[in-house]
Structures are given as C-alpha cells and as structure tokens.
Image (cartoon, rainbow, N blue to C red):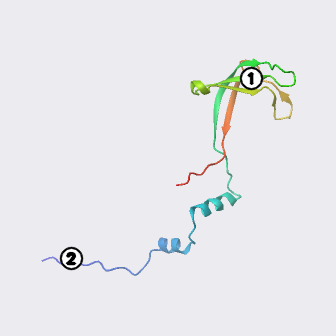
C-alpha cells in the first residue's frame, strides 16, 4: 500500500515575494506621475509621418493673406487626402520659404499623450 505524503505548508517566504512586499503600494496614477517626473526619461509625443506632394498653389483673394498650398497625402482615405496650408514656412535658419508645385513633402502628425482610463 502506497502512502501519500501530505504537503506541509512552508513557513518560508521566497526572496522575490519579500522584495515585492517591501516596496510601497502605489496606485496606477501615482506610478504614471512618478514616470512623468523622471528627468532621465525622454517623453516623446505619439506621432506618425506621411509622405505627400504639393498639388497646387492657391492665390489668396486678399493681398494681406498669404497663398495656400494644397498637399495630397499618399495613403490617406479619399475624403482626407487633400490638406491646405498657408504657403509661408520658416526653415531651420529662420528664413521664410515657400513650397513649389510638385514638391515632395513629409507631413508629421503629433498628438498629446492620452491615457486610457479603464
């Protein structure tokens, strides 16, 4: 006849559990706030970059307003493909530049970080 040994409860606590118990409990919002205050982390906005082409230049009716450049974004849905911007841009040296018809451009769309609450 085989006898089965009853498993006796262990009074020792594993080291990994002891380390976790030693840490203070924090809510999720407190952990997020702590991460936002950490200066060594570089928080970057969520963004996407899409290629586009300048389709046409639209002159303004009023001389005090700048002309507009219509940019066609590749890969966008049909209703959202064309964007119009003022054709008055500033380059990295601070000089004013303008787009020309047929120029290839990159459109960067950035958003504020948004935390989904559950």
Q: Which of marks 1 and 2 is nearer the N terminus?
A: 2
Regarding mark 1 in the picture, which secondary structure is present there? Answer: strand
Front-lying residue, 10 or 27: 27
From the top left corner, tell me how far across and down residue 90 is, in percent.
Answer: 82, 32
Front-lying residue, 115 or 49: 115
Q: Residue at x 87, y 21 (%)?
A: 63
> As drawn, which residue projects farthest toward the left?
1
From the top left corner, tell me how far across and down residue 14 is, in percent.
Answer: 45, 74
Residue 48 placement: quadrant: top right
Q: How many marks?
A: 2
From the top left corner, tell me how far across and down residue 99 is, in percent.
Answer: 77, 23
Read off the residue under disc 1. 69
Side (left or right) of 25 relative to 108: left
Read off the residue under disc 2. 4
> As drawn, which residue projects farthest toward the front?
62
Residue 22 placement: quadrant: bottom right
């Amino acid at each position: 006849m085989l006898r089965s040994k009853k498993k006796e409860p262990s009074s020792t606590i594993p080291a990994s559990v002891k380390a976790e118990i030693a840490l203070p409990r924090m809510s999720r919002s407190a952990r997020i706030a702590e991460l936002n205050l950490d200066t060594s982390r570089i928080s970057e906005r969520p963004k996407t970059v899409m290629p586009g082409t300048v389709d046409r230049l639209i002159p303004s009716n009023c001389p005090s307003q700048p002309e507009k450049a219509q940019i066609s974004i590749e890969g966008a849905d049909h209703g959202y493909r064309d964007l119009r911007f003022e054709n008055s841009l500033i380059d990295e040296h601070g000089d004013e530049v303008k787009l020309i018809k047929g120029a290839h451009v990159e459109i960067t769309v950035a958003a504020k970080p948004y935390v989904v609450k559950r």
